[in-house]
Structure formats: structure tokens, C-alpha cells
Amino acid sequence: MTPAARPAARRITALVGSVALVLAAAGCGGGEGSASATGKVTSITALDYYTDAREHAQWSERLTACGRTAGVTVEHRSVPGASLVPKVLQQASSRTLPDLLMLDNPDVQQIAQTGALTPLDRYGIDTSGFDKGVLSAGTYKGKVYGLAPTVSTIALFYNKDMLSEAGVTVPRTWDELERAAARLTRPGRYGMAVDANATFEGTWQFLPFLWSNGGDEGRLDTPQAAQALQLWVDLVKSGSMSKSVLNWTQADVHDQFVAGKTAMMLNGPWRISEMAESRNLHWGVAPIPVRSQGQTLVTPLGGEVWTVPRNPSEARREKAARVLACLNDPTHMLAVAKQYFTVPSRTAVASRYTEQVPAMRAFVKSVAQARARTGELGVGWPRAATGIYTAVQAALTGEQTPQEALRHAQQIATGS
Amino acid sequence: MKRTPTRGRPYTIAGIVLLALMLFPVYWMVNASLQPAGDVLRGAWFPLHPDFSGYATAVHDQGRALATSLVVALGSTVLSLALAAPAAYALALLRPRGATPVLFGILVTQMVPGIVVANALYGAYNDLGLLNSHLGLVLADSTAGVPFSTIILRSSMQGVPREIIEAARVDGAGRLRVFRSVVLPLSTNALVTAGLFSFLFAWSDFLFALTLNTTETVRPITLGIYDYVGAHSNQWNAIMATAVLAALPAAALLVVAQRHVRAGITSGAVD
Amino acid sequence: MKDGAEDKAAPGRGRAAVRARLWEPIARWMFLAPAVAYLLLFFGYPIVENIVMSFQQYTTTTFYTGAAPFVGLRNYTGILSSDLFARALPTTVLFTAGSLAGQFVLGLALALFFHRRFPLGRVLRSLLLLPWLLPLVVSATTWRWMLDTDTGVVNHTLRGLHLLSSGVPWLTGTSQALASVTVVNIWVGIPFNTAILYGGLQDIPAHLYEAAKLDGAGPLTSFRRITWPLLRPVAGVVLVLGVVYTLKVLDIILIVTGGGPADATETIATRSYELSFQQFEFGRGAALGNVLVVISLLFAVVHLRANRRALEAGSTGP
């Protein structure tokens, strides 16, 4: 997969657009949406976790465009990923939820359970033709609460120059990964980087290793899970991976990679457009290594879902639903996919996408096989996810062996 | 002679070295804020070619947060002094029945962790509609300023000579007049000290800003920095520039009002 | 008839006097009432409310539905028997004890240093207060960045001096992280300790030292025989206040380590915050908060007694 170069003109337009938007946002001040005297809704609020300056601007642009079709302006806010769910729960309790809310797909069922979201069928939104995995993630008790324009997963990114300089081929198995990472490590540079922080993002990055090796979130204290965790422990212990992975977010991992401080990293394709801008960075992307060659790679299904929270104003909800429908229509789906190198979540659009962007064909296939995190445990997922990142942290710091850490994780997951 | 004799220059040099060590983090913050965006990860020792883009980003992103902090801190200062000055007058000079338990209560407030207050206030504010409001934050932030100011003003007012008050009373001044025209003017120093510290307490507040805000409407600078750290890991110059801006009031006070700062620290502890 | 005249006048004046007598305490209380009302609302109410909440079960849906069933002591038994508490308690003790020892020893050393008069001494002493005045968020953010394993200036310097080849995992090793947050808290607390102890040193009459010198006492002896005994009341106050303030610390830990890695820097205060405001289990958060209040109150008693001693010591001084 090679990154498509972004035309300079478009970049400048985006920049000008974003500056105008930021100025507009600073000008209107108040966080609450406004309604004119006749009670007609003229503006709604939207909340997501696209805090990265560029990503935020791009989404502002898209929300504005979709807002226009619904006849409203959209006040767009972003909070850091790890604080989105606490924020939403807090807002639910204080009745200050936004009109339009983005959630990471495994969080939808948990939030829907609190009663803070409204099912989308009442707004007459078409949910047919969506990829089953992401649709199921947005479904709670038989009703669809959220739709994601595109889906994605994570892969192994590597610095071509560093690999060829060290005479290392792209690793396909864990052994190869460990050897490659060790050989790529230099003073001031690590061979490999992942996000192992104590949030669901850390869990998400560990899942490909857990799942591909036959591990399962329903039963965490298995030898398969311990092997996967041991791999991460070994990478840190051998010095191929910085101990700072314990604190890094995916954005930090990306920054390290771009700054040349790590030769390989685990990350998502939505970073590609940004990486494409660093001229001196020659990078490639490959499937995440599995333990032994015969194993099938199983990655988690990523994708941010848009929802309509339960707010008192019917009129505002209607407007928000129309913006949501617009974000998920084939045109915008395709545009988002091209912008972030993700995959349209309607299967028909996805196949059109592979025709237009053949380089994404392999990726489209891998995403189709990706596994939804809430698929097995439903609302029980957050507990298991908490158990997993707790175990990763305990094992990487050396507090516990992988076996002990996972036994503890299983206790957390089952709430005992 | 209360003081030990004057020592010479070696002590001054040693003092400067000690101070430099202690204030190194402050220097490092300023230094980092003046580096260009990419270079901060490498970290030069001196800002030889100061780059102000970090400040431009900081002011652009956090300008409103700075304004919010200013409004909240000023509000808390006014509220703290308005509540504390009459209370201190009563405790120092009027001594009504029950003054001792009140004084005891004020000392006990120092033992109450902020998280306990925030825990309960969240529910109450939720019912009263005070979440995400300037007023709510001013009221909560004054939990530091009110007890502190009361203690400081009380010890200052205890020093007001009785004769002056008696003289005013003989002239027919009521309690309020005595308070307004005699006691308050004589307590200017303590008022300034109490006001400065109330301002700093509210300006520095992080806990209440974090827990009593659920939207972005009222977001002080401390929260701005906290969110920044989570979101812009590659823009340390902007983060540090924001930190410098947030540190300015404290630094300015130290330069302009040294005497009051010292008075505040000592009287806050021993009384 | 003189008596009668007086009797005639008396009722008016008497009523006024009675009214004045009744009015008098009320008028005095009018000055105190607003502050007392505020303190009751913002300290009294939270304490009572926390006790009530700690017997209820709050969930993420509680604020939506208003349902928070009474669960008796279950929050307390759950919290106190959990391994979260079993880890947070020793962490809290280590953090507090370490902070106190560091702040006090270094604070005292600096106070003794500045007690000597030398050019620029006053100015330097004032500038020393800066770390204490800065918003904790600012200090913590700066330190977090300075302590970064790979890019932080601390490891950079250690490597430059060839003291070690690889970096110390200041924020990513479990024991190092606890040491790091303790160091940051010490740094923040030194100025306060120095200022108070310096004040205490100033109150020790210089002639005592001169007399000791005439008796041939060295600096160590005069510290042991004069400085320390006379400084003890002030030292007591500083230490107890240190305990009370350190137990409450939340900002520094949340920003520098976020409680990690692997929960190594979770104290009772940060746990209480997380239970309430991350997991929305306000009942359990309140229970843990109350445990913290009880610990603080134990020290409050010590504080008030130490305070009285300090004041008495102060008033019997020169």
C-alpha cells in the first residue's frame, strides 16, 4: 500500500478552511447550541475524540458540510480519547450531552445501556448494507444506536530505510519480530513501539497478539494469552521496545516513528495521510506478525460510531440524525475512507472503493475478517478490556509474571 | 541583635547555586517554550534562537481558558474577602458567643480533602444547575480562599489598638462604621495578602475544574494544560508556553509583592 | 418623687437597653454569619453528604434514574478488603513519609543556610518561594516532561555525565515512578518548609548562640542544644501540616503518572477520584474519601495540639 500524495492546493484549502472554522468557533463562544425565536433549530453540538489539530479540522469541515444539508451549523468539540467515555457518562448525569456524539465502537453498548442514547430506527435512518461486524457493535438489545462511516484495524508499520540499512526483512512471525526489533535497535532508537498504556487503547493494540494465538477475552488465564503477553515482555526486557510504551498513546507511538526514534510500530491507517507529509520518511505497512506461520491473523475491528444522545428536544435530535445520516451516506463514506485510508462500512461502497483505490484491496479484505470487540461479551467487554490492560501493565513493569497478571485479569473480567 | 553577623560573598555564590538548582524546572519550562515545535524532543540547553510559535499556538488555543481563569480567580478573590473580612472582624474584635467553635471549625476545614468536597458537590451542583457555570466554580474555588483569608485577617485585626476603636465608638460610630472606617483601613496589608493568595488558590485550582465541568463552557487554564498534554504530545513547546502563561501570575506576585507572599506563608501556618 | 421621675423614664430606656442587649449578640453574629453559612455549605454539607453517599450504591445510570439503593456497609467492606486498597494504603504511606522527610530535611537545611546574613540573601530567599506558588498543574507537567525516560533532560544529563548508559525509567518503572512523584512533591513543598522554619529560626535569640560560643560549643553542639529544642514546636506544626497536605495530593500524581504504571502510584486520594469520576461509583468513592478524612482527622487532633504548643511556646518567647 503506497500513500497517495495529497495535492498541495487541497492542503492549503483545508488549512484556510480550518483557520476560518477555528476563528468562527472562538467567536461564537457559548457551548450550548442556539435556537432562534421561532424555536427552529439553527445549530447543534457534536463531540468526538479527534483532538489532533489536523484531524479535528477535517472533521469540522465534514460536519459543517453535513450540517448544511440539514440546515444547521455544527459546533464541534473534541476531547482526548481516554476521557471521552468518562466525559459522556458525566454529561449523561448532568444532562449536558451533545446532540451528536461519536463513540469508539466497543463503547456503544455500554453507553446505550445507561439509556443515554436513542435508537436510530425512529429517525428513519437506513441501516441496510452495512458490514455485519460494525453494525453489531452499534447494536444493543436488537436496536441500532450508532453507525460508523468507515472501519479499520491496525497493522505493522516499518521504516524502509532502517530495515534495509540493518539488513532486516519485514517480520512475519514473533521470532522474526523479536530478532528484527533487536537488530534495529540503536542508541537513541528502538526497534519496535506499541501503545501499552492503561487505557482501552492499550488493550486494542494487544488484541491481535492475543486473538491470533488462540487467546480469548472470555477466558484470559490461558497459556495462549500468556505467550502473547510474554512476547511484549521480552521486547521490553531485551531493550527493543522502550519502557515508555507503558505511557504512550497511539499518537505518541506515531510521533516516535515519524521522529525516527523507532523503526517499527503498531498503528492504524488513519495516520497515513500525516506520514505522507514527512518527505524523508520512507515507510511500509505489513500484517502484524503471528506466533507461527500457520496461524491466521485476527485483528480487532476499529471504527468510530456516530450516535444521537437522548436529549429533550425532539427537533434537535431530528437535526442531529440528519447529520448522522449524511456522514454515513455513500459519498461521505467514500470521502472519509480516502482521507484516512480506512474502509467504507457499507459493503457495496467498499467494493467500489477497491475499484477506485486498488492499493487498499488487501486491507479491505483484512478488515472484513476483523473481529468486533463487543462481539462475544457485549456490555461485559469493558471489564475484560480493563483486565487486559491491567495485565499488560503489570507484566511489562515486571510486577507480575504474565501468568499471574492474566490470572488477575480474569478476576477483574469476571468481577470477582 | 537578633541576627547572626553578615557573611561574605562565598555564601552569596552558594545561595545562587542552590537557587539555580531549585529553579531549574522553571528555567527548563521557559526554555522548552521557546524551542521550535520539532526540536523539543531533542531539547537544546539554551533557547539561542527563540521561537515564539509555541506562544502563538498557546494563545490561539488557550486564550479563552486564560480569560476564564482570570474571571474565576477574581470572582473568588472578591467572594473570599467579602466573606472573610467581616468574619475576621467578628472573631478578632467582637468575639460573639460561639466564636471559638467557629475558629476551631475553620482549622478543621484544612483537613478535608478536596476530593471529598468535589464528590458531594457534584451531585448538589447537578441538581442546582451549577455544573459548567462560572458561579459554581467561583464558589467551589473559594473553599481555599475563605478559611485562609479569615485566619490571616483575624490575626492582623487582633493587632488593631483598642484605643482607636474605643475613640471611634465614643464619637458615636456603630460596629459597621468602626469596621469600615477604622479596622479595614488598618488591615490593608493583610487584605492584600489574603487577596493575593485567594487569587492564586483559585487560579491554580485543578480538582474542581476537573470534576465540576462536564462541557467546555467554563474551562480554566489548568484544565487546558491537562487536556493539552493528552492531545498534543508532539507540541511540547505549545504545552510549555501555556504553562509559562499559567505561571505568570505567581511569578509576577513574587516580584511585585514579596513581602505579602512571605507574610501569607508564615501566618497561614502558625495560626 | 425623684424615684418616681426615674421610674417614669426607666421603661423607655429599659426597653431600649433590653433590645440592645438582645440585639447585641445578633449584631455581632451578623458579621460572622455569611462566612459560617458558606463554610457549612461547602465543608459541612459535603462531609455529611459523603457519609450518606457511602452507604448507597451509585452506578453510571444513577444520575439518570435517580436510583441509589441503600447498601449498608457494603461499600466499606468492599473497599477495605479489595486489593486496590491493599496497594493504595502502603503507597499513600510511602508517598507521605517520603515527601515529609525530604521536604523537612531539605527545607531545614535551606532555612539554616539563609539564616546567615549575606548579600542578596533576602532576594534569593524570596525567589525560592516560586515552586510553591506555581499552579501544581504547571509544575507537574514540566516535571513529567523532564523525567521522560527517552527524551527527558534528567536522563539526558545522567547519560551525558556517563553515570549510566541507558535511561532510568522514572515514570515507567513501578518503584521509580513512586520515587518520582515523591520527588516532585518534595520540590513543591520545600519552599513552604523553608519559609516556616526560617521564621522559627529568626525567633531564637542570638545571645543564646553567643553564650554557647563563649562556652566553646561548636556548630553541631549549638544546633543540638539550642536550635533544635527551640525549633521543635514550629517543626511539629510544619510536619503535621505536611501530612495533612500530602494526604490530599491529587494533581501531581494524576498529571505526572496518572496513577501508573501498573497502579504503582495510586494513593487513596487518586483511587477515590477514579472511583467517583471515572467509574461513577460515587458510593465507593465517598467511602474511600471518608477513610481519608478519618486519617486526616487523626492528624488534625495532633495538629491542633501541636498548634497550641507552638502558640504557647511562641508567647513565652522573648
Image (cartoon, coloured by chain):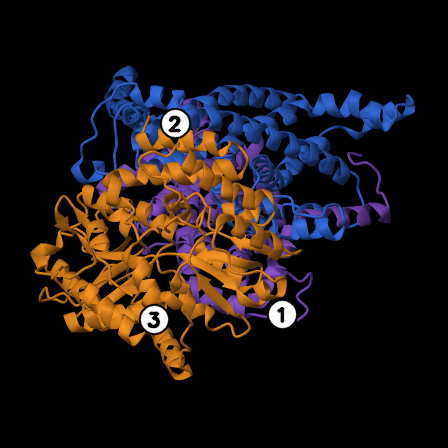
Chain colours: A orange, B purple, C blue
Quadrant for the C terminus of chain A, please: top left
Q: Horizontal and vertical percent for residue B4?
A: 82, 36
The reply to whether label 2 and label 1 mark residues of one chain is no
In this rendering, position of residue C111 left or right of residue A391 = right
C294 w.r.t. A54: above or below: above
Which residue in the structure is indicated by mark 3? A339
Foreground: disc 1 or disc 3? 3
Q: Horizontal and vertical percent for residue C231?
A: 70, 25
User: Which quadrant would residue B46 be assigned to in this image?
Assistant: bottom right
The residue furthest front is: A294
Which residue in the structure is indicated by mark 2? C288
A233, A316: nearer the viewer: A233
Tell me, yes or no, whether the two marked residues, 1 and 3, touch with CB atoms within 8 Å.
Answer: no
User: In terms of secondary structure, where does tag 2 sit?
Assistant: helix
Q: Is residue A406 visible?
A: yes
Residue found at x 40% / y 68%: A54
> Which chain hosts label 1?
B
Q: CA distance from mark 1 to mark 3?
A: 35 Å
Q: Horizontal and vertical percent for residue A32?
A: 24, 59
User: In terms of secondary structure, where does tag 1 sit?
Assistant: loop
The dot on residue B50 is: 1
A376 w.r.t. C108: above or below: below
